[in-house]
Image (cartoon, rainbow, N blue to C red):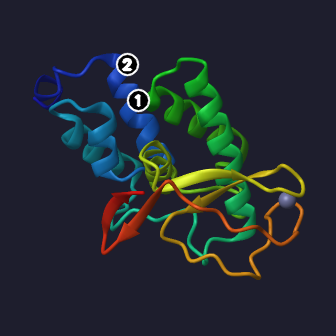
Amino acid sequence: MQGYKNKSLTSKEFSLIEELVEWGSKIKDIMWIVGLPKTELYAKQYYKRMGIRPPNGLPGTSTAKTVKLEKKMQYSAMAVQYLNLLDDGIGKKEAMLSVYRLHWIEYGHDEIQNVKPSTWFSTTKNIDCGIEDLISCLTCGGKYILGADVIQEVSDRCIWCNHLLTFHSFKKTIKKGVFIQK
Ligand SMILES: [Zn+2]
């Protein structure tokens, strides 16, 4: 009966859901990515089969002060790859997934380096709509992600070369949670 209920998903979608579950994606993200009925049901079933509880809660941000340096480096390197793929004409979701897929293969089981899929997914969305920007360090040229709502401190240092960072002025500013075009 379960097979019948899931009939609307193709084998390609089934394997995508399984992959997303193996990464530890939130059900909400899986539903958004696959975008078809039965997605939620199958994702939950697959989590159960894996014997893992699906994560939930609010999406994290890669630019929070609490995010460790190694992970910040990963997010920034991934954002560079993501924007390169968009430049090559790859669609946003596809680019977002391929970047995470590569990250997972290399760092999926590396506790220090691996980053959460949900935070990565929201990072790409934040970059797309300008809440976060990929900035170049003026000293080493290394790229790092900066959030428009993150208060920059004079003591902030580049994640790559450790030099002090310059202040960045965003195209958009946040006021009480509302974006205002400057
Ligand atoms: Zn630097």
Q: Name the residue under label 1.
A: 16
Image point 55% across, 26% down: which residue? 86
Labels 2 & 1 near each other (Cβ < 8 A): yes
Q: Position of residue 160 (x, y in %)?
A: 84, 59
Query: Between residues 101 and 19, which one lies in front from this camera angle?
Result: 101
Judged left or right of residue 102, residue 173 is left
Q: Where is residue 21 in the image (x, y as percent from the top left)?
A: 41, 44
Q: Answer with the quadrant where ligand 1 appears in the image.
A: bottom right
Q: In this view, does 151 lie above or below 170?
A: below
Question: Which of the 4 quarters of the picture holds residue 20?
Answer: top left
Q: Is mark 1 on a helix, strand or loop?
A: helix
Quadrant position of the N terminus in the picture: top left
> Pointer 1: residues within 10 angstroms few (<14), some, or many (20+)?
some
Residue under numbered circle 2: 12
Image quadrant where residue 154 sits: bottom right
The quarter in which the C terminus is drawn is bottom left
Question: Which residue does the image show at 72% across and 42% down from the upper left?
Answer: 106
Please say whether residue 109 is visible from this viewpoint: no
Query: Where does the image place residue 150, in percent across and percent down from the top left?
Result: 54, 72
Q: How far apart are marks 2 and 1 (CA)?
A: 6 Å
- Amino acid type at circle 1 is Leu
Q: How crowded is mark 2: few (under 14 residues within 10 Å), some or many (20 or more)?
A: few
The numbered dot on residue 79 is none
Label 1 CB sits under 8 Å from any ligand 1 atom: no
Q: Element under label 2?
A: helix
Q: Is residue 106 left or right of residue 12?
A: right
Determine whether, in the image, residue 16 is placed left or right of residue 79.
Answer: left
Residue type beneath disc 2: Lys
Position of residue 128 relative to residue 161, above or below, is above
Let me know if residue 35 appears in the view. yes
Between 144 and 17, the residue placed more toward the observer is 144
